[in-house]
Amino acid sequence: MSSLALYRRYRPESFAEVIGQEHVTDPLQQALRNNRVNHAYLFSGPRGCGKTTSARILARCLNCEQGPTPTPCGECQSCRDLARNGPGSIDVIEIDAASHGGVDDARDLREKAFFGPASSRYKIYIIDEAHMVTPAGFNALLKVVEEPPEHLKFIFATTEPEKVIGTIRSRTHHYPFRLVPPGTLRDYLAEVCGREGMTVQDGVLPLVVRAGAGSVRDSMSVMDQLLAGAREDGVTYAMATGLLGYTDGSLLDAVVEAFASGDGAAAFEVVDRVIEGGNDPRRFVADLLERLRDLVILAAVPDAAEKGLIDAPADVVERMQAQAGVFGGAELSRAADLVNEGLTEMRGATSPRLQLELICARVLLPAAYDDARSVMARLDRLERGGHFAASGPATAPPMGYVPGPEAHAGVQQPGVPVPPPGPGTPDIPPGGGAAAARAAVRASDGPAPDPVSGAGPGAGSGAGAGAGPAVAPSPQPQPQPQAPSPAAP
């Protein structure tokens, strides 16, 4: 197997092979079909998105023997020279402006530019990192870029087009390149792995796409590193997370479930596992924010995975759907805001672990804040009855727990004597609560039933309570004690 880097081994050789830049490649191909090619082009965009590659393809299309054509033949001498592994053409000159951007280099280029091509149709200058050309160098090139000879073409490639002076930009056709969408990049990486004959576990490609951040070259470099270290079973998820430094999904699941159930012990245990495992707390917070973002989207759009709003394996999407179901919208939004603020505060922090623990404490305690989002989060919890997750701890009640009547079953309450069982003792309803307390009071110190009506003071709480309030029997007059008479003399 060749040791050539993946991004060089699979460098596109035609506009049809360039991915994610149809807004650029389609107009260029149409211009070639119409034979309306400009004398100068400016390709701008983030690194690794195909600017220099497209410049080489354009040069290949212009100098093909059957051209100018949008589809080079690949058989003529010019096409072979400008192929992926070709030796290069003397008439296509690539200049790195980072090291050749001075006025002397521009003067040298201007003097050589007027000589005709050796064997091709055009002499083409590809000036990479064009923003590194000094203003004096651009001014030295201005005349030849404005009115070049018929055989001369310029292609400027830069990541910072605003640094190219306006007099040069106004004389070029500007094509802005963009970052490649994650779905397109993931499919392309899967195709490359298939060509390489390597097995890749589910969940690895989303990590690679995230590490590449939309850059094809960066993603290919990360994929090349993983393939180089793969064993007989291919690239595993554990290997990818360990090598790329991302947080394992089990830790994210654990901390999200701890937030949902209000379990502070579980949340801080996850923090300890993160630190003891040697993970970067900042990376963990960034991954947690990414997970909360997915939960917010899933809570709002249940079929977000089918619509391409979330890039994750099917089993991970199922877990996240279950997690989003135990959160309220206000709770998720509040947690994401707090984590985002904490991530900003962690930049330059002397104690990242302390910042991470403070983030967890803020998320777990909405009652400690009186702002609008905390109030809404508490309302979300009240609407769900105070139970936040079925998978919460069995030993500790969730936050907001209020003991119900069943919590007092079989427990003697202080100050309420329990009468011995007997024929005159009313039955105490099982389960305790208010009804049991009233029955116990009636049995202990309530007056005896009236022999006429057979009703006591508690009869109003029985089945006939709806007929009217019970009338207590009038108290009998008690004899008053007499004062002792004075003794006779």
Image (tube, grey):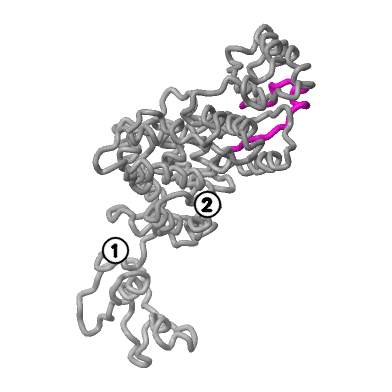
The span shown in magenta is: 158-178
Q: Which of marks 1 and 2 is in front?
A: 2
Q: Mark 1 points at which residue?
A: 413
Residue 168: in magenta span: yes
Dot 2 crowding, Cα within 10 Å, few <14, some 14–19, many 20+: some
The answer to whether residue 365 of the structure is visible from this angle is no
The quarter of the rendered structure image containing the C terminus is bottom left
Q: Mark 2 points at which residue?
A: 309
Mark 1 element type? loop
Q: Position of residue 271 (x, y in %)?
A: 35, 37
Q: Nearer the viewer, residue 377 or 390?
A: 390
The tag earlier along the polypeptide, 1 or 2, is 2
The quarter of the rendered structure image containing the N terminus is top left
Side of 338 where 419 appears, left or right: left
The answer to whether residue 394 of the structure is visible from this angle is yes
Residue found at the very far bottom of the displayed protein: 452
For image coordinates 25% across by 43% down, the residue present is 233
Q: Position of residue 133 (x, y in %)?
A: 66, 15
Q: Which of the 4 image quarters holds residue 57?
A: top right
The disc at residue 323 is none
Q: What residue type is labelled 2?
A: Leu
Q: Which of 112 and 278 is in front in this view?
A: 112
Q: Calculate the distance from the C-alpha at mark 1 to the C-alpha at mark 2.
A: 56 Å
For image coordinates 59% across by 18% down, the residue present is 95
Rendered view: 221 above or below 88: below
